[in-house]
Image (tube, rainbow, N blue to C red):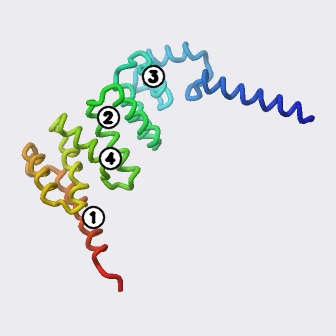
Amino acid sequence: MRRGTLIVLACAVVAAGGLYLLKGRPQLAEQPYAEREAEIAQRDASDLNPSEMLARLQLAARQQPDSPEPQYFIGVLMRAQGRNEDALRAFQSALRRDDTHVPSLVALADVIMMRDGGIVTAPAAQLYARAWRLDESQHRAGLLSALPAYEAGDVDAAEDHWAEVKQDMAPNDPLFGMLEAFKSRIDEERAAEQTPAE
């Protein structure tokens, strides 16, 4: 095959791939997309597989372009599939539509914490804190938001914040166990750093 023919074929493949990316819907079985989408919209959500659920949420996102909910649920679906970067972008998209959407604030903070190795870093803590300030029933978010202060050695500030969050919590709330586990890990890491190497 001559070089010129190869170049023409390569250009055709690139053009076809570009059109598919713009117009195609790889998550759905082959069928005219509008018909398939309409059929999915009519079915009970519990009967949909993940690809069909994603298509339905994408339809909802187009129908409600200013609503954070479809983007939030797209993020939940992505996270359940282990697609954390896609989930992160979906939660960010939800917050661009409504920066007070508490479920998206908490979900985005959770994804950031997972990305950062299970450590509540400052970006996640800021999101948790905002979620708790908007909705003080978000006790988990309120507790987690003070962990960076505790880790930085500002124990009094962290304890003051936790006391504020705990005012609205039952004394035997299992979230206290979660908090103590985080604190213990931080304390152990701090002790290990202070122990001189032999």
Q: Is residue 125 above or below residue 61?
A: below
The residue indicated by pointer 1 is 185
Seen in the image, is 158 located left or right of residue 185? left
Residue named by callout 3: 56
* Residue 13 visible (yes or no): yes
Q: Earlier in the sequence, mark 4 or mark 1?
A: 4
Mark 3–mark 2 Cα distance, whole angstroms, equals: 19 Å
Name the kind of residue labelled 2 in the image.
Ser
* Disc 3 and disc 4 in contact, CB within 8 angstroms: no
Q: Under tag 4, what secondary structure? A: helix
> Helix, strand, or loop for circle 3?
helix
Q: Along the polypeptide, which appears first: circle 3 or circle 2? A: 3
Q: Position of residue 145 (x, y in %)?
A: 23, 48
Give the alpha-carbon distance from disc 2 to disc 4, as whole Å. 14 Å
* Foreground pick, 197 / 179: 197
Q: Mark 4 sits on what residue?
A: 123
In front: label 4 or label 1: 4
**Residue 183 x/y as whole percent:** 22, 61
